[in-house]
Every structure is written in C-alpha cells, then in structure tokens.
Image (spheres, rainbow, N blue to C red):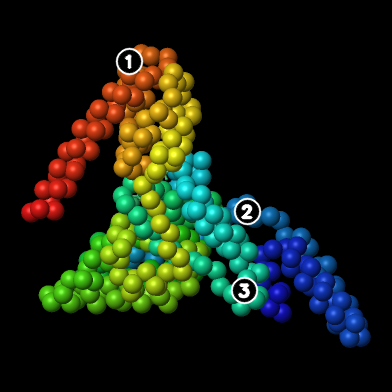
Amino acid sequence: MKKLLASYGRDEEFRAVVEQIIADEEKKNNNVLARSLRKTLENIGVSPAPATAGLSRLVPFPDEAKDFIQRVEPRHTSQDIVLSHENLEQFVSLIQEFRQADRLKRHGLSVRSKLLFCGPPGTGKTLCAEVFAAELGLPFFHVRLDSLISSYLGETASNIRKTFEFARRQPCVLFFDEFDALARSRDESGEHNELRRVVNSLLIFIEQIAPSGFLIAATNLDQHLDPAIWRRFDEVIWFELPDTGMIRKYLTHAFKNSKIAFDPGVFAEELKGYSYADLEKLCVQTLKTSILDGSKQVNDAHFRSALRQAKRRRRRESQIEGGRLTG
Ligand SMILES: Nc1ncnc2c1ncn2[C@@H]1O[C@H](COP(=O)(O)OP(=O)(O)O)[C@@H](O)[C@H]1O
Ligand SMILES: [Mg+2]
C-alpha cells in the first residue's frame, strides 16, 4: 500500500506496484480479488502526460504574503554559474536525493531540504539558489525578510505561519536572502526584545518545517554565525571568493561568446580578492569598451582600461568600508 501511494503521479511505477499486488493475491489464491483488480487496472487506461511534465503543480499563493514573498522567474541556468568542485558535488547530491526522495522515504530516510548558504557578497549565493530552482523545475520564491519582520511586528503574526504553511504544501525553493539581518538581530538586547521574539519564532518555524521543496537562506556572515541558527539547517554550503584557478575559469567563461585577441587568464593573479560579482562588472565593462571602440575583437587594452576603473572602484569602496568600521 505504501508503495502504491508513493508511486502517485508516476504511471509506470504505479502499474508495476499494482501488478505486484495482483501477483501476490494470485499466489494467496485470492483469484476473485486478483481478477477484479486486473479489470480495474485495465479500465484506468494510460493517463496522458501532463502538459507541464517535470514542473510542479502550483498551490494558491496566500494574498497576505504578497508584500514579503515574491515569485522570481529564473533567468539563469547552470551554464551561467562557476562553482567549486566541492559545491558542484554537493548540489549534484542534493538534486539526486530530491529526485529520488521516494526511494529514501521508503527506508524511513528524509531528504536534505533546508540549506544555509554562507560566504562573502558577490560569490553567487543568490544566483545559485535561482539556478538550483531552475534545475529542479521548482518555482522560486524570494522572501523579503525586512518586510516580513516589520509586517510581523505590525499586526499580522499569522503571515509567517501562512508563509511556512505555503512552503510545506507548495513544492518550491523558498529563498531567504540577507539572512544576516535576522542573525544580527538576535544579538541585540533590551529594547529589541520584541524583534528577538520574532526572530526566535522564525527559527522555530524553520526547524519544524519539512518543506516539500527546499528552504534556502543566504548570509554574508560566517564564523560569527550563531550556532542556534545554523543547526536548524540540514546543510551549510560555503561560497568562497574565487582563487586564481577559479578566476581564470570565470574569465574564460565570461568571454566565451566574444572574439578575443588576448588571454584574460594572465590577469588572474592580479584579480585575487575580487568577487565573482566584481569580475562580472569588469568583464561587462571590457566588452562595452571594446564595442564603443568599434573594435572587432576584444583586446588587452580594453581589459586594462576596465581594470583601471575596477581598481578605482574597489579603492573607494574599501575607503567607505574602512570609514564605516572606524567610526
Ligand atoms: N559563482 C558565480 N559564477 C558566475 N557568476 C557569478 C558567481 N557569483 C556571482 N556571480 C555574478 O555576480 C552577480 C551577483 O552575485 P550574487 O549571486 O548576487 O552574489 P551573493 O548573493 O553571494 O551576494 C550574479 O548575478 C552573477 O552575475
Ligand atoms: Mg545575494
């Protein structure tokens, strides 16, 4: 019976299970039941493949949640992301688990479905969540924590409950970006008691939910992350700034559709400390410079010109950052 239920929606598997039940009944000499089951099976016929094969059904979205949850149409695919070997392996394994959840469940095992993405800005946490949803054919929902928290503080405490209820029923990737806002507010004391209460209740929801897709939270904090937070997740995935090997890989990838008259890889060493987002800006600027130059090929000079701008930008940013830290 369990197998029969688990095969719901998959015609072939369903039929195989029914055949097995019929065979068992025949063995037990329950021929009347066996014949009747076979007749019923024959009458079911083959259901036509749904138009959205591979895509999940959509559960009505709670109206109250519109202010803080947004459906985002994925625009990127796995072709657009450069991943470390380690993370690639992680994602392949997660996807495999999800796709074969039934097999695991039959053994009483659950799928890892609550993920925490940690790492500095611009290393692909948001991009990866989007690509992950696209790869799985799951709708991608973005939770805006700031609005969620303020709406919670306001009047609608049940919004959070509805959000989680939605994620329990709707196979989707529910993405909490900028989760650090939450992580940080846990530290704040005294007058922020109310906020802390909200945060704690959110964490309890996270702990208790068994999403029918995935719940992913992303944070820029790493070592300072409160254990009370990361232990609610099934898996913590680290995103790092690219090393020279990954920088080279990214540069090759960034110019794959352009005619280039230089080897961008020679700049890899000089670009240490740049995030993927920085590298992306640099490469886009290089292409623009080359186009505006009326050039048929992207060359070394275009890259250097964009690199000078990138360096100036980084200097300014680090000054601002430094100013903020010292006072
Ligand atoms: N690993 C990566 N591979 C390719 N491009 C990336 C990667 N990480 C970031 N980018 C580029 O930088 C942009 C910003 O990255 P994002 O995912 O928002 O970083 P984060 O969420 O870690 O701050 C992305 O839209 C993408 O263009
Ligand atoms: Mg992000």
Instruction: State the residue at coordinates (44%, 41%).
Output: 246
Label 2 environment density (alpha carbons within 10 Å; few <14, some 14–19, many ≥20): few
Q: Nearer the viewer, residue 319 or 1?
A: 319
Mark 3: amino acid: Lys
SS for callout 2: loop
Above or below 206: residue 256: above
Which of labels 2 and 3 is toward the front?
Answer: 3
Q: Nearer the viewer, residue 287 or 239?
A: 239
Label 1 environment density (alpha carbons within 10 Å; few <14, some 14–19, many ≥20): few
Q: Would residue 71 be visible to someone looking at this image?
A: no
Instruction: State the residue at coordinates (14%, 42%).
Output: 319
Relative to 179, 208 lies left or right:
right
Picture coordinates of residue 22 (x, y %)? Answer: 84, 77
Q: Quadrant of ligand 1?
A: top left
3D distance between C-alphas at marks 2 and 3: 23 Å
Picture coordinates of residue 312 (x, y %)? Answer: 20, 32
Look at mark 1 in the image and give the residue it sits on: 293
Label whose residue precedes the other's in the sequence (2 or 3): 2
Instruction: State the residue at coordinates (89%, 86%).
Output: 28
Mark 2: amino acid: Ala
Instruction: State the residue at coordinates (28%, 65%).
Output: 224
Look at mark 2 in the image and give the residue it sits on: 53
3D distance between C-alphas at marks 1 and 2: 47 Å
Look at mark 3 in the image and give the residue it sits on: 105
